[in-house]
Amino acid sequence: MKQVFIPDFCKKIINRLNDCRFEAFLVGGCVRDCLMGKIPHDYDIATDATPDEMIKAFDGFKVIKTGEKHGTLTVICENNAVEVTTYRIDGDYSDNRRPNSVEFTRSISEDLARRDFTVNALAYNENSGLIDLFSGEKDLDSKIIKCVGEADVRFLEDALRILRALRFASTLGFEIEENTAKSIIKNKDLLKNISSERILVEFKKLLLGKNAEKILLDYKEVFAVFIPEIRPCFNFDQKTKYHQYDVYTHIVKSVSACEKDETLRLACFLHDIEKPSVFFTDENGTGHFYGHPAPSAITAEKVLKRLKADNKTIEKVVDLVKYHDRQIALSEKSVKRLLSKTSPEFFRDLIKIKRADSLAHAPEYQNKDEYYNALLEILEKIENEQQCFKIKDLKINGNDLIELGFSGVLIGNTLKKLLKAVIDGEVDNDKTELLSYIKKEIM
């Protein structure tokens, strides 16, 4: 058996429970990660002690009653927070998310039987070794995600497990066992009963997975349950030499090609979502999608608001979608025009999106790295030379304009005209030059 490492702070918690004559095991994801040779992000412990018995046992520890009703306390040991949960049997589920009630049990076997997937239904302590009642270690070795017991039952209990299965398959690079896969498709509409916030959390993790491309392609109908706007992209022939894939496959390929950043990958997933709505063919039968970024940005905002994304994420994704198809010439003027509306940080992220989008085109029409690297070199030069690309960078301000007799909206409009003139090279960013320009060209 592979080694399961128990950190000292967990040993102290387990030993305290043992000293009080209770069982205690590391359970779930931390055991799974250890068996895979990974360092767990957090540790969970299960015990046959009830919450009341745990409170007595942990006298001297800081204990937070995070979920006492469901048997969970958070124990602080050596500045580490560890969830310790009583073995339990879940009651009926009426909302496809949480049990109506839980029954505490003294059996680790009954507790493991209620868990979602075999690779998570694992328990370990130094006295008993690995408790593996559902061949979870074998499934880890075979790289398989499989439900504990009947898949339909597991998903009816908690529909979020549908996305969790896909997320684990994506992040771990695993396959989904046949019956589990069939049940995911069969029960996909149960996701309509799950809160948007929980769906978005799982979806973002899935997008970052090493196996994201395969999962997004194989289970596209699942994602259309909570992003129905994506369905018209399925199998949509782009009818152009620039693309070798249908719209949805192109989208997925761009996600896969993008840096592993959840905001950037969300932008890739949504960047072409309205291509089908603007599609037309010319007299030669060639497909065109003129102006598709604008409606795609509108739909991206609608989707992310529905999924309860935070405002910062929404704003950035929408802007990336809006600008993803913008042509940027290899000139300081062109780069500064875009910077005037955005920022250097945004520009760098936009280049990442454009690279990923390009890599999802037909090979002969993929822009080479030289072009994007050249754009970034121009950006770096602009920054290093502290060139003017924002109104705040102008060597003249609103007070100067007031002294010249400007007022109200004319002040803002004039500053915008001056910035454009500086970016276009019509006038130097020098106060004397700018004042002269105003008198000649604007007043």
Image (cartoon, rainbow, N blue to C red):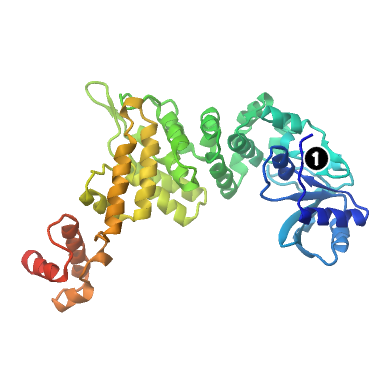
Q: Is residue 9 left or right of residue 166?
A: right
Judging depth in this view, the residue of 312 and 77 nearest the camera is 77
What is the secondary structure assignment of the residue under circle 1? helix
Residue, x 55% and y 31% (percent of image)? 215
Residue 222 is situated, as x and y percent measured from the top left of the image, at 56, 34
Residue, x 23% and y 43% (percent of image)? 329
Rendering quarter of residue 79: bottom right
Rendering quarter of residue 420: bottom left
Reading the image, the residue beneath label 1 is 112
Residue 70, can we see it? no
Above/below status of 231 relative to 208:
above
Residue, x 38% and y 36% (percent of image)? 357
Q: Residues within 10 Å of mark 1 (few under 14, many from 20)?
A: many
- Quadrant of the snapshot with the C terminus: bottom left
Judging depth in this view, the residue of 95 and 200 nearest the camera is 200
Residue 419 is situated, as x and y percent measured from the top left of the image, at 20, 61
Residue, x 55% and y 38% (percent of image)? 209
Judging depth in this view, the residue of 206 and 430 nearest the camera is 430
Residue 231 is situated, as x and y percent measured from the top left of the image, at 46, 32
Residue extending furthest toward the left: 440
Q: Is residue 114 left or right of residue 350?
A: right
